[in-house]
Amino acid sequence: MNNYLFGERILKCHFMPPEKVHAELFKGSEKKFTKTTHPAVKRYNRKRTAEEKAKMTRRLLKKERQLRKRLANRGIDYDFPGFAAEISLTKKKKTSESNSSLNMSVNSEDSTPVCTPSFLERRKSQPEDSEDREIILKLPPASIKTDPQKMKTRKLQKKAIGKKGKCKT
């Protein structure tokens, strides 16, 4: 089986004397694979209590502070928003929601702008570009085969038919 083509890779096999084989090489090989009872996805997406959320935010903020310290110790001056900025934004949003009016224009503190009538009017008043900046890429459908592909498949089919007739017994 040495140099055997196995799934687009070459399989290398060598004889090993029993002294070189590890004693626990095939330990647990007789066990069948079982599906886990509580997959990680369910654990990750589960509903969390307020206490668990608070604990998670404390842990994330602590890790962020440690990362900033490590960067500062190495002399790297890098400022990123991180989790602290996200938490402050959510607190600001909660307080501003009670005082907000319905016809408010774009809020600079929001992560995404709000599309209000005044915002849409400003957008319409801006001149449009005559150039089309959209790139369209057209690919041939996968079902249509080119001539070289057709030739390859025909050759492979002929070889397969030829091998069926030449069976060693």
Image (spheres, rainbow, N blue to C red):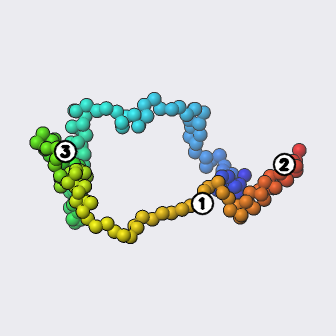
Q: 10 Å neighbourhood of mark 1: few (<14), some, or many (≥20)? A: few
Residue 44, given in percent of the width and then of the height, sits at: 36, 37
Quarter of the figure with the C terminus: top right
Q: Residue furthest bottom?
A: 131
Residue at the disc numbered 1? 140
Residue 75, given in percent of the width and then of the height, sits at: 22, 66
Residue type pointed to by label 3: Thr
Between 130 and 142, the one lying in front of the other is: 130
Residue 63, given in percent of the width and then of the height, sits at: 24, 49
Check residue 90 in the rendering and tell me which mark sits there, or answer none. 3
Q: CA distance from mark 3 to mark 2?
A: 69 Å
Residue at the disc numbered 2? 164
Q: Residue furthest left?
A: 99
- Residue drawn 77% across the image and 57% down it: 154
Quadrant of the rendered structure where residue 50 is? top left
Mark in front: 1 vs 2: 1
Q: Tag 1, which secondary structure? A: loop
Residue type pointed to by label 2: Lys
**Label total for image:** 3
Q: 10 Å neighbourhood of mark 2: few (<14), some, or many (≥20)? A: few
Q: CA distance from mark 1 to mark 2?
A: 35 Å
Q: CA distance from mark 3 to mark 1?
A: 47 Å
* Whether residue 81 can be seen here: no
Q: Tag 2, which secondary structure? A: helix
